[in-house]
Structures are given as structure tokens and as C-alpha cells.
Image: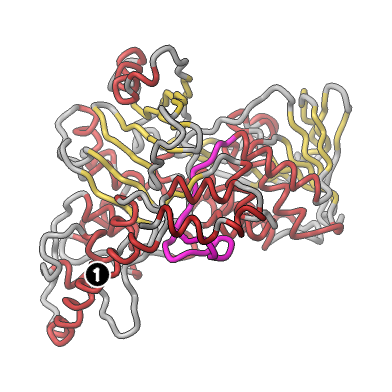
Amino acid sequence: MGTIPTTRILIVGGGSAGWLCAAYLAKLFGDSKEITLVEAPDIGAIGVGEGSFPSLRATLAAIGIPEAEFIRESSATFKQGITFQNWLHGEEHYFHPFSMPSQRPGAPELLPYWLQGLAGNKPFAEAVTMQKRVVDAQRAPKRPGDSDYNGPMNYAYHFDAARFAGLLAKHARKLGVRHVQDHVEGVQLDLDGAIASVDTREHGALTADLYIDCSGFRALLIGGALGAPFHSVSDILLCDTALAVQVPHPAPDTPIASATISTAHEAGWTWDIGLQERRGIGYVYSSRHTSDERAEQVLRAYAGPAAEGLNVRKIPMRVGYREQHWIKNCVAIGLAGGFLEPLEASGIGLVETAVHMLGALFPHNGEMAPVARHFNQFMGERYARIVDFIKLHYCLSKRREQFWIDNCDPATWTDSLRDKLAMWRCRPPQRMDFLTDFEMYPPTSWQYVLYGMDFPKAMPPLPGLEPLAEAARQEFANIAAVSARAVADLPDHRAFVALLCRHENAFRNDFHTIRATVIH
């Protein structure tokens, strides 16, 4: 196997993971690789959460999909962060923005001065970025005329998972990906334990040099055929079930939030995601702390009358990841490799990470083993750090339901998270606490969550701070002033999404109209 060049790639499974992988690799390698994707025609996408991370912009640009086409074809809207409601006591909220704290040339790092109280009583995210004001005013993160995938605010998207997969499939086929619709009925191994072929119902045996398992929770190749052990983290992340419902907007002009709304409840939390025609609402909960019947009551109470008569879909969640994502000539991407609850939209981000890494480290000469070892280490570390970040949201809560009490028990924390929190009691998080290449979430994301959850504002005596204190005060005031101008300058979120969905000629004709009608 090691002496045969890797030119033929077989992707098993479609959905967002399979088709993103197919489109990205086809764009990257062109005609030098033969890429086939086989998927069963009657298996739909899981679509838990339907949210993304800002990295998706670069991925879509790399594939060559225009932003307006993505918005139109995926029923997509903009996401500028996450609003967390009722996570601390049950009567408050905080915001995790995607934009970084102000980094204007000449201005000091603002966190130490915020910890000293120089921003008054403003929450950290509101004091150091303008994004919360923009989201609260229901503005879009960019303006007409801004180039594709660029804008003054950092942003990601909400999207319809099935429609997104369809868009990726269309582009992948244009790029030369062969699409086989068939059921996989078996996997054959060779004498070395590598995959020799994938058996399908109607097309017989399909062969390749590299097999990519995008078969979702079924993990037909990496789990079923190759037996990669699954590392459960259910003793750390206690939620194991989700209920989901799709609720139509009451009117065509209903405002659309440009942030995910995550609301804590007695045994978990709800997501609330606004798409163009509907809201996606789901309740992620621990079956050890509530019943399915009670969970549905919580979900329907949150969704309100609009959900009456609508079916609720139950999604069991096996939370954890494979100890090996790459074995022999098979690599798992997406749910086949692992799943962590959708609290911070890590799902699509992990797919992107795996696809980018596969493209960068691709074993063109057929030498799989060294790439596999590197890939496995990288993905394992990435998953482990995301587990810590998600757990951070739970372990600082002061809610008194048993679910939250159990999450605050240090026995359910990892050693690495326990060490981080111990260090941060005497100083704030900073870059040296993180190994950048393994992190999905930057240090500022940890800061937003940590201080949003009212972690003690520890600040060691640093004599070098005082000379720049006045500059920090001016920067806090500047952010407040610029926030007001941003709200005035950025368009209404729904109106801007509608503009992007129109024909390109209409976009040009309406450029000045939207500024006159929705900015003021």
C-alpha cells in the first residue's frame, strides 16, 4: 500500500461533511485526483444546531462559492456570536462575540484595565467590542459593497443543513466529483487490515487508494470495519439527547437575530437559530436528569404557540470521539470521527479542521502511516480542548438544579480544565495558556465566557499598567462612541439578507436604496 501513489479517493457518506470534503479536495487537487462520493439516497442530514464558526467563510471562499449564492441557496443568515441566557443564576445574560477586543494601534490591551474597573460596570464583551450593540440593534455584520466574506464585524452563519449540503454537492459535481447514489452493504479488508473495497447494492465493489468515512454516527468504515475505539466524554459533558423543532416565522418581515440564542433550563439548554423562513429550536439535555416527556414540555414552552401541532425530532447524542481518526487507508471526518454537543458550533468547525489538514498533509506518495500518526495526534488534541471549552460554560454556574450542581462538581472536570481555573483565580487567561495549533477557540473566547459567567476578576499588582490607564479609559469611551456609529452605518439584518438573495443585477440597483431605507 505504501508504494502506490494516492490518486483515487472514495468518500462514503454525503451531508455537509461529505460534500464539503469532496468540494474542497476537488478544488484543491483539480484533475490530479479521482474523487467519488457514494451516499444512500434515503439518508438525510442530522443538522443539529445549523450554526457555524467564522472559519467557514475562508472555507467557502476556497471552494469558490460566492457569498450571495451561499446565503440564497442555504437559507443562510449571519451569526455574530452567541447570547447566553440564564446560565449563571437564571435571570441574566452575557454575550460571546466573534469580534476580538479592540486592538487599535497605540491602544493597550484592555482586559487588565477592565479587570481594574476602568470601564465602569459594563460587561467585558460590551466594554471591549462594538459587536453586542450591533447584535442588539439587529444589524448585519457587513454593508452593501463589502467584498465577499469580509465586513467590519467578524461573523459566521446560520444555515439549513440539508440545503447547504445540496449546494456543496452541486459545486463538487461541477468540480468533477463523481456522485454515486447507492447503499453501502459491506466493507472488505485486505491481508494487512486496510480497506480493499466498499461493497454497494447496485454498483458492486468500489475501490480507492484512500477511503474517507463521512457516514455520520454509523461510522461504517472507521468504526464498523476497522474497529477504532470510541472515547466517550459523557462523564464530563453530561448532555446526551436533543429534541429539535422547526418553527416558521409569524410574518415575512419578522426580525432575525444575528446571534445564536442559548438559554439554560433545568437539565440542559435550548438553541434558537433564525433562518430566513423559520427558526430552528432545540433542547439539549441530560437523560440522567430529566425525562423525554419533561424535555419536550420545556422545548414547547420555550418555542411557544408557534410550535403547536409541529413534530419534535429526537436525536440521541453519543458524545465523544475516536481514539484514532485515521487507520491504514481510512480517515474519518465529521460525525464518524466524533461528536460534541452543538453549544459553540464545533461540529462544522471540526469538519473544516479535518478537511484542511487532510489537504495540507495529503499522502500523495501513498505513505499513510506518518500522516495518520500526525493527524490522529492533532485531532485528538483538538477534541480534548473543545471538551474543556464547552465544560467551561457549565462548571461556573450557580443554578441549583441537580444537573447544574453535578456540572459544577470538580469530579466531572478534566485535569486540564481544573488546572486552568486554578491558575486564572490569580490572573486572567492569556496566550501562553494555549497551544495555538490545537485550539479552535482563541484565548479571547475563553475570556468572554469566563467573565460572562462572573468568574472572580483577579488581577495581580502590575506597576506597568498605570502609565497607560488614561489611554485605556479613552479606548473604552471610543468603543462606545464607535458602537453607536456602527449601528447607524450597518444595515438591518433581515433586509440585508433579503438583498443578497436577489439577483446580482438587483443587488447593484438596490445598493443605495437599502442604505436609505434600513440604515436610518
Picture quadrant of residue 87? top left
Look at the picture and state if 503 lies above or below 272.
Answer: below
Look at the picture and state if 97 lies above or below 256.
Answer: below
Helix, strand or loop for the magenta stretch, by majority: loop
Neighbours of disc 1 within 10 Å: few (<14), some (14-19), many (20+): few
Residue 520, x across and y down, in percent? 35, 57
Look at the picture and state if 444 lies above or below 74.
Answer: below
Q: Is residue 384 visible?
A: no
Left or right of 497 in this view: 304: left
Residue 20, x across and y down, in percent? 66, 47
Q: Nearer the viewer, residue 125 or 74?
A: 74
Please say whether residue 482 is one of the residues in the magenta stretch.
no
Q: Which residue is mark 1?
A: 481
Can you name the residue that lies furthest to the bottom here? 467
Left or right of 116 in this view: 20: right
Left or right of 386 in this view: 6: right
Q: Nearer the viewer, residue 495 or 352?
A: 495
Residue 340, x across and y down, in percent? 45, 39
Q: Is residue 171 visible?
A: yes
Look at the picture and state if 487 lies above or below 387.
Answer: below
Q: Nearer the viewer, residue 458 or 70?
A: 70
Picture quadrant of residue 475? bottom left
Q: In the image, what residue occupies the spot 36% across and 30% down?
A: 239
- Write the start and end of the magenta stretch as one range: 140-161
Please say whether residue 151 is one of the residues in the magenta stretch.
yes
Residue 371, x across and y down, in percent? 67, 58
Q: Amino acid at mark 1?
A: Ala
Q: In the image, what residue occupies the spot 72% across and 59% down?
A: 362
Q: In the image, what residue occupies the spot 77% across and 24% down?
A: 183
Q: Nearer the viewer, residue 293 or 155?
A: 155
Q: Secondary structure at mark 1?
A: helix
